[in-house]
Amino acid sequence: MQDAETRRYGVIGQTVSDTEVAYACESIRRLGYGVIGGGYDKKALASLSAAFERAAERHRAVHGGTDNLRSMDEHNTIRLPLAWEPAFLELAANNTILEICARLIAGYVVLNQQNGVINPPRAQRYNQGAWHRDLPYQHFVSSRPLAINALFCLDAFTLDNGATRVLPASHQQEDFPSDRFIADQASTIEAPAGSFIVLDCMAYHSGGVNRTDRARRAVNQVYSIPLLKQQIDLPAALGEQFTTDPRLRRLLGYDVRTPRSVGDYLASRDGKAAT
């Protein structure tokens, strides 16, 4: 809440953040990140935790086992858990996160990717422990986000278990900063279980070192403009009959698939005004 006694002079305009969503959006615009509650109680979190473990087991079984995934440095990631567990489709459609996306991203928003992320215990190395953007290899900035990263904290994020680190306002600068700047300015985001750490995807961030004896689990979801290619072609991966809900089909990208021929393109234009 804003301090009613905040003193100022020479100010002729001020941002109004009168709700939790508005404040999270202000934080993301200014700093590149924010934290907001997801609306999940202990029972819902327990259900999601069980679903996470089932999805992890299924993912490993289908894709050659833990050793095969380790050979690709994929053993701490569960790709597209919503394909295995309906609870993660509901998580992707969280109303609070979709409202933030609608406020920050111009126009249509699609789910670009969803991945379960495991920060392993006892200070083991994992690939998300390196600094990166969630639009990797891109060195540009934009006037408003092209994509939003909503990292769901299935477990509490703490200093001990490798909470996410972020470089504040790095979404406003093209280049990766110096090592000295990183050492001086990196912030650690502690967050309770059931909350979302929401970032502009151009903000540099990394997972911290998990020095506890338990894995720290999260579900990373990226929402983007349709112009950006999905990490996995979700309609193709999930199948045409995965859902009939128009809202979910729109979110998953069924309405913005790339035409595979001129005939398909013309069919998609039928009945639409020329552009």
Image (spheres, rainbow, N blue to C red):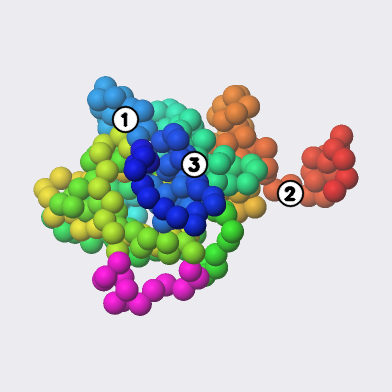
Residue at left offset 50%, top offset 48%: 14
| First-in-chain label (3 vs 2) | 3
Q: Which residue is mark 1?
A: 48
Q: CA distance from mark 1 to mark 3?
A: 34 Å
Assign a secondary structure to mark 2: loop
Q: Residues within 10 Å of mark 3 (few under 14, many from 20)?
A: few
The x and y percentages for residue 82 are 44, 35
Please name which of the two marks, 1 or 2, marks the residue nearer to the observer. Answer: 1
Disc 2 designates what residue?
260
Q: Is residue 71 left or right of residue 148?
A: left
Give the labeled residue for mark 3. Answer: 16
140 sits to left or right of 212? right
Disc 1 or 3, which lies upstream in sequence? 3
> Between disc 1 and disc 2, whose residue precedes?
1
- Relative vertical location of residue 89 with respect to residue 153 in this rendering, above or below: above
Q: Nearer the viewer, mark 1 or mark 3?
A: 3
